[in-house]
Image (spheres, coloured by chain):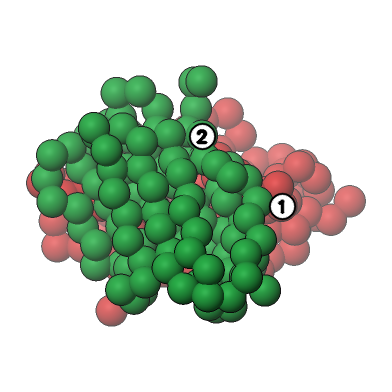
Amino acid sequence: GAGVSQSPSNKVTEKGKDVELRCDPISGHTALYWYRQSLGQGLEFLIYFQGNSAPDKSGLPSDRFSAERTGGSVSTLTIQRTQQEDSAVYLCASLIPNRNTEAFFGQGTRLTVV
Amino acid sequence: AQKITQTQPGMFVQEKEAVTLDCTYDTSDQSYGLFWYKQPSSGEMIFLIYQGSYDEQNATEGRYSLNFQKARKSANLVISASQLGDSAMYFCAMREGDSNYQLIWGAGTKLIIKP
């Protein structure tokens, strides 16, 4: 597809279960972000991948959160032992990392932990 | 310290009026870029407009323009002739420096256009 694709679009999971969220960036975009957005709030930075550089994981809220990006393309965000406070929309964005290029966002995954 | 500040959590504007959404930023870099995004209730993030720190003219894109005041470190978004479909959250973001293309986001402004 032409845009950033995220799956699933919605995920309901039981507290304590692990979940995996997927992001397919735009082809050729070497930079990729994961954000979390709670209802009515701004974007909370989670992790940033840029080419072959070590990812910036400074935004991951706990060691239950991890992410990887395989082959410089698809990225997965994994949340282990989910908690109710993990409920949010998880947004992925990709871009060509130049100063003046905009980030393109996926539609997000709405995660609900019950 | 906040790097991007959006001081208006919410705004109500009459349809067809112009609206200015405030954004101030803090950086010591000479090279940076400023972005505005719109997020309607459907949730998608829509890129609106970009202003580079070295751009001498204010950016414009259709009904959107950016009032860039470099000395005051402000990059306000102006929407002319507002429409009901402009109701959304609006986010200001900055990318600074040449070696790290991290985006720094403001908290957003919720704009509601009244008919």
Quarter of the figure with residue A111: bottom right
Instruction: Give the chain letter for green.
Output: A
Indicate whether A47 appears above or below B83.
Answer: below
Residue A107 x, y percent position in the rendering: 58, 42
**Residue at 48% over, 50% down:** A21
Q: Position of residue B54 (x, y in %)?
A: 21, 39
Q: Amino acid at mark 1?
A: Ser
For disc 1, the marked residue is B41
Q: Which chain is red?
A: B
Whether residue B88 is visible, yes or no, is yes
Disc 1: host chain: B
Name, please, the residue furthest toward the right: B115
Secondary structure beneath disc 1? loop
Percent across and percent down for residue B79 are 61, 44
Q: Chain of mark 2?
A: A
Q: Secondary structure at mark 2?
A: strand
